Amino acid sequence: VQLQASGGGLVQAGGSLRLSCAASERSFRTTGWFRQAPGKEREFVSLIMWDDGSTYYADSVKGRFTISRDNPKNTVNLQMNSLKPEDTGVYYCAVRKRGGFTLSPSEYGYWGQGTLVTVSS
């Protein structure tokens, strides 16, 4: 599976960005978004399960971010509103072929190249 993440950029605090993750094919069960700030470990942001559309969010983004899927395009979008400086980082999408619910980056076998999000104060 090849993943292409896009949509990052520079935005002021309070602004919005929309990230997209396009997959080359659809043999996986879950798509997750993760982010990594400078000097920090990669952390979970959100996921969506393709079987039933279930979603899950990290507490830090709940109510501000919305994940959605576009089935015909094998694409997952992450709408990010009310952005804060602490949302700054490289955002990665990843997919997991096995079933089950997991927030751990090590459980996702395929990763996109990352897209940089910078939120200025």
Image: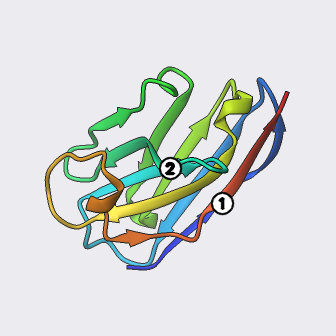
Residue 78 in the figure: left or right of residue 73: right
Q: Which residue is mark 1?
A: 115
Rendered-image quadrant of the C terminus: top right
x, y (%) of residue 11?
82, 39
Q: Secondary structure at mark 2?
A: loop
- Give the residue at x 66% y 60%: 115
- Up the image or down, 21 lies above or below 101; here it is below
Residue 95 in the figure: left or right of residue 28: right
Asked if marks 2 and 1 touch (Cβ < 8 Å), the reply is no
- Give the residue at x 52% y 61%: 21
x, y (%) of residue 16?
72, 34
Q: Disc number at residue 41?
A: 2
> Of callouts 2 and 1, which one flags the residue occurring earlier in the amino acid sequence?
2
- Given the image, on which type of amino acid does mark 2 rest? Glu
Task: Find the distance from the CA under tag 2 to the CA under tag 1.
Answer: 16 Å
- Give the residue at x 65% y 29%: 81
Q: Can the viewer see residue 63 in this picture?
A: yes
x, y (%) of residue 101?
19, 45
- Up the image or down, 52 lies above or below 87; here it is below
Q: Can the viewer see residue 7 in this picture?
A: no
Q: How many marks?
A: 2
Q: Secondary structure at mark 1?
A: strand
Q: Quadrant of residue 116?
A: bottom right
